[in-house]
Image: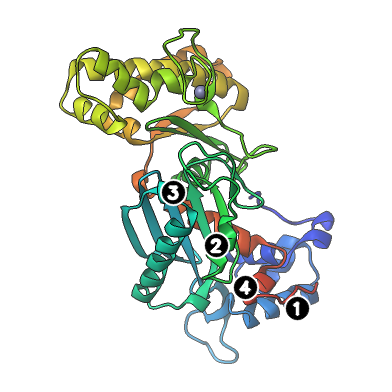
């Protein structure tokens, strides 16, 4: 997402998708802008622009009243040239949105959906909702340019297949894109839900901060990394699996991953609920913890604060290692009370190196429940519009000519 495509190196490699980005960002409003920003010859710019205009992605808007002669025009991105579907599947709920190509929501719905019903049933229900939402938005299936989908488990991003997901019985190795493409003939991208939440938060409020960490504290603890303005997945898609960093040898802190002493097993929502049960409270889920914290229960507040400190010590290492400018805290425990953030802040600022924390901000999620669909939309829009084959991707098969 760097700016400045200029220079002789660039001219050979500037794609039509990159030209489109300059128009989408508002950095280029004329053909001359495009030529000077990219170093491409005006004739090349003209050719590619004609293709973008013919493909419906760019139009020439009139600029102000004409003063005689040819009216001045500016290049503008046509965000209505299609729509994307954004789907955020959780363990027991889902949220689905139809968005235009600027990721503005046109229609959205959220409801209960048990991921354990298995891929066929879940995707079928989601697809039915998608068709209903399209109708609400006044669009049809042929308008769908891409589908972005997040699931609550690890995913092999290239193929869109969940990999041994612990809370998604029946989904292991299933090609989610294949199921979706039975309904929509468009690119389908599938990622872990925490990754798309991270991307959503970054896109909505932090685009001037290329490097951020998003931490979700719900039943478990997950982390999404945005590096250089893009999701960082690592070589196998397992990057950011911060919840299973070991913080204690205590044998009672058995983690669902099979190891002992993971941060998730001492500071996640399920772990806090367990600690509350030993104190005699009825607390089985992270929601129960949230309820107790909201009523001002001092044991619950204290345990959440302690969890924040424990998480802070792991995050202090992550800060030294990755040097993000922002850490965003999401998930229901983070939303319940300032205590978790307070605990995190206390330890991170104390334990991280001064240079790494000089400008570090630790914030609460700005999007809450909408982070996932927001990020799913961004993920798929960036893929289809930045692609070297942006026009091929938009019309189903046409290939780009330079
Ligand atoms: Zn673990």
Dot 3: within a 10 Å radius of its alpha carbon, few (fewer than 14), some, or many (20 or more) residues? many
Secondary element at image label 4: helix
Residue depicted at 44% across the width and 46% down the height: 205
Dot 2: within a 10 Å radius of its alpha carbon, few (fewer than 14), some, or many (20 or more) residues? some
Q: Residue furthest top?
A: 250
Mark in the foreground, 1 or 2: 2
Task: Give me the C-alpha separation between circle 4 and circle 1.
Answer: 18 Å
Which quarter of the rendering shows the C terminus? bottom right
Dot 4: within a 10 Å radius of its alpha carbon, few (fewer than 14), some, or many (20 or more) residues? many
Q: Which mark is residue 179?
A: 2
Residue depicted at 63% across the width and 79% down the height: 55
Q: Which residue is mark 3?
A: 372
Q: Quadrant of residue 388?
A: bottom right
Q: Earlier in the sequence, mark 3 or mark 1?
A: 1
Mark in the foreground, 4 or 2: 2
394 is higher (above) or lower (below) than 147: below
- The reply to whether residue 358 is in sight is no
Q: Earlier in the sequence, mark 4 or mark 3?
A: 3
Question: Which residue is nearer to you in this view: 11 or 272?
Answer: 272
Residue 324: x, y in percent?
55, 31
């Amino acid at each position: 997402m760097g700016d400045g495509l200029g220079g002789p190196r660039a001219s050979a490699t500037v794609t039509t998708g990159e030209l489109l980005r300059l128009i989408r960002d508002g950095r280029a409003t004329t053909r001359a802008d495009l030529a000077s920003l990219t170093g491409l010859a005006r004739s090349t710019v003209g050719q590619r622009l004609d293709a973008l205009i013919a493909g419906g992605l760019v139009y020439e808007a009139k600029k102000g009243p004409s003063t005689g002669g040819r009216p001045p025009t500016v290049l503008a991105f046509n965000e209505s040239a299609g729509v994307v579907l954004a789907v955020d599947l959780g363990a027991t709920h889902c949220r689905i949105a139809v968005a235009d190509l600027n990721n503005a929501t046109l229609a959205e719905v959220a409801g209960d959906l048990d991921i354990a019903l298995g891929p066929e049933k879940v995707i079928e229900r989601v697809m039915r909702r998608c068709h209903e939402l399209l109708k609400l938005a006044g669009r049809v299936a042929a308008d769908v340019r891409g589908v972005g989908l997040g699931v609550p488990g690890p995913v092999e991003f290239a193929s869109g297949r969940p990999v041994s997901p612990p809370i998604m019985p029946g989904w292991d190795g299933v090609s989610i894109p294949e199921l979706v493409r039975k309904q929509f003939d468009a690119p389908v991208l599938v990622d872990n839900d925490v990754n798309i939440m991270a991307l959503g938060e970054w896109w909505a409020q932090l685009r001037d901060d290329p490097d951020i960490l998003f931490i979700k504290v719900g039943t478990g603890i997950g982390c999404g990394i945005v590096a250089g303005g893009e999701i960082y997945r690592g070589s196998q898609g397992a990057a950011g699996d911060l919840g299973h960093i070991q913080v204690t040898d205590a044998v009672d802190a058995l983690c669902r991953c099979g190891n002992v002493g993971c941060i998730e097993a001492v500071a996640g929502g399920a772990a806090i609920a367990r600690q509350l049960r030993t104190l005699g409270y009825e607390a089985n889920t992270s929601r129960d913890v949230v309820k107790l914290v909201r009523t001002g229960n001092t044991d619950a507040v204290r345990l959440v604060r302690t969890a924040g400190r424990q998480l802070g010590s792991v995050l202090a290492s992550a800060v030294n290692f990755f040097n993000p400018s922002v850490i965003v805290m999401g998930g229901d425990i983070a939303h319940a009370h300032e205590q978790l953030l307070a605990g995190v802040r206390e330890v991170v600022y104390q334990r991280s190196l001064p240079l790494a924390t000089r400008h570090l901000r630790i914030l609460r999620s700005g999007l809450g429940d909408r982070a996932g669909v927001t990020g799913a939309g961004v993920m798929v829009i960036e893929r289809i519009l930045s692609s070297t084959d942006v026009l091929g991707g938009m019309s189903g098969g046409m290939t780009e000519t330079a």
